[in-house]
Amino acid sequence: MIRFVPAAVFLLVLTGCGSPTSREARAVAAAREFQAGLPSYLRPVAHSALPKGLFSLRAADCGRCHVEIYQEWRESSHARAWRDDPQFLEELKKTTAEAGRDASWICMNCHTPFEAQFPRLLAGLEGGDRGKPLFVDNPGFDARLQDEGVTCATCHVRDGVVLGPTGIATAPHAVRKSDSLQSADLCLSCHQVEATLDDVSLICTFDTGETFAAGPYPAEGKICQSCHMPEVTRPTTNLGTPERPTRRHWFGGSLIPKKPEFEAGLAPVRAHYPNGARVVWEGLPESLSAGRRTTLNFSVTNAEAGHTLPTGDVERYLIVTARVRAADGTVLAERSERFGTRYEWFPNAKRLDDTRLKPRETRTFPLEFEVPSGGEITLELTGENHRMSAENVAYHGLEGKTVPSRVFLEARETRPVR
């Protein structure tokens, strides 16, 4: 349950006696105390003092030594989670669209999770209303760090030390071994949030963790990092450290660039991640009989994703299309299947259907047509991964500003007609 700070108490915190530094410290302490009573998805990653040996908490400074890891992170959706995510920024505008109300702080807890990324800290809710936050200025705010979105410190800095998988004693900064880096829980603070917040008309429907837990992968010892952070053996710094098993930091998912200009950097990353869906024709004959009514089957399998496919934002969906053409290009048969969720948002939000694929689930679809008299037929399969629909792109005015989808499969083969 969310507690609230009465306005009178809140003002007392801000106007308390003592030096400005003392007043700041009291206000920040009160904000942290209030936030401690909130669910994890409604509070930032806790403040940490700068670990000894670091220049700052910024990723660019981490990248001075962890060069390859930094370069990978720069191409990731984590690095694009704030000012480089046009869709999110448009959605964020809705949280302050009503005069006198502000729910933006809720969304920022996953897109800029570290406390130092917040210019103001939530210290209370007027009357318990999440749309009427009471803020105090954050003296530890770092605007450059905010621009980094989900940055290195989000996962690797706690209590004045850098968390690492080994805790190597020769590191040039304070470090501690942490098993949390080998746990799905680290990811699920943002990727498993299902909540209806009626007072601010927000619904969080990120059930990735839940659908992963219900699938077969946890029993096989898999965690989120098993797929999204592929293993690699390499030195982790440019300081002459030895090679060791570590992980990539691309955090690959849909691999749709947030903006058109990010395509060049993201394209090479796709070689390291298989497509989540496997789309194939089932039991194709070597040839087809002329003039006969024939049914061919194609299947779609969630072959690689440990959670439902797609997952994440409710606007995501896959379109798989199977098509049969005659020798002259005429389409003899075509079928498209959509995989995703559909919602009705007004007057009350509710899920209308859910056609997502569960882990390792296969669905088979028939395609019936009449075989032409001769020549050959061409069999086509295409797969499209959509971040958002064309209608929503137009609604938000994002034409040319974001990349709404990508084609992940284009397959073509022929069969003779006898």
Image: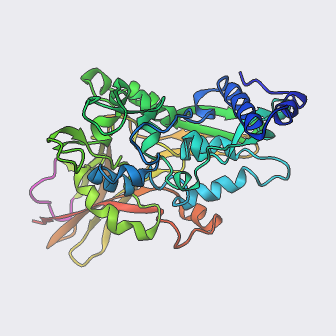
Q: Nearer the viewer, residue 257 or 314?
A: 257
Query: Residue 367: x, y in percent?
Result: 31, 54
Residue 73 in the image: x percent, y percent?
36, 52
Position of residue 79 relative to residue 327, above or below, is above
Viewer can see residue 227: yes
Question: Quick one: which residue is furthest to the bottom in this view?
Answer: 328
Question: Where does the N terminus fall, quadrant-wise?
Answer: top right
Q: Main secondary structure of the magenta part?
A: loop
Q: Is residue 23 above or below residue 118?
A: above
Q: Specify whether 124 is left or right of 150.
A: right
Residue 63 vs residue 205: left or right?
Answer: left
Seen at 90% across and 29% down, the residue is: 8
Left or right of 189 in this view: 362? left
- Which residue reaches farthest right? 8
User: Which residue is at 63% across, 32% downward?
Assistant: 195
Note whether 181 is above or below 53 in the view shown: above
Task: Report if residue 286 lies within the magenta region.
Answer: yes
Q: Between residues 382 and 390, which one lies in front from this camera angle? A: 390
Which quadrant holds residue 197? Answer: top right
Residue 31 percent location from the top left of the image: 71, 32
- The residue depicted at 30 percent of the width and 74 percent of the height is 330
Most extreme residue toward the front is 19
Instruction: Give the residues in magenta.
Output: 283-292
- Which quadrant holds the C terminus? bottom left
Q: Is residue 374 visible?
A: no
The answer to which of 302 and 64 lies nearer the viewer is 64
- Which is more toward the observer, 81 or 176? 176
Residue name at image x 63 percent, y 59 percent = 90
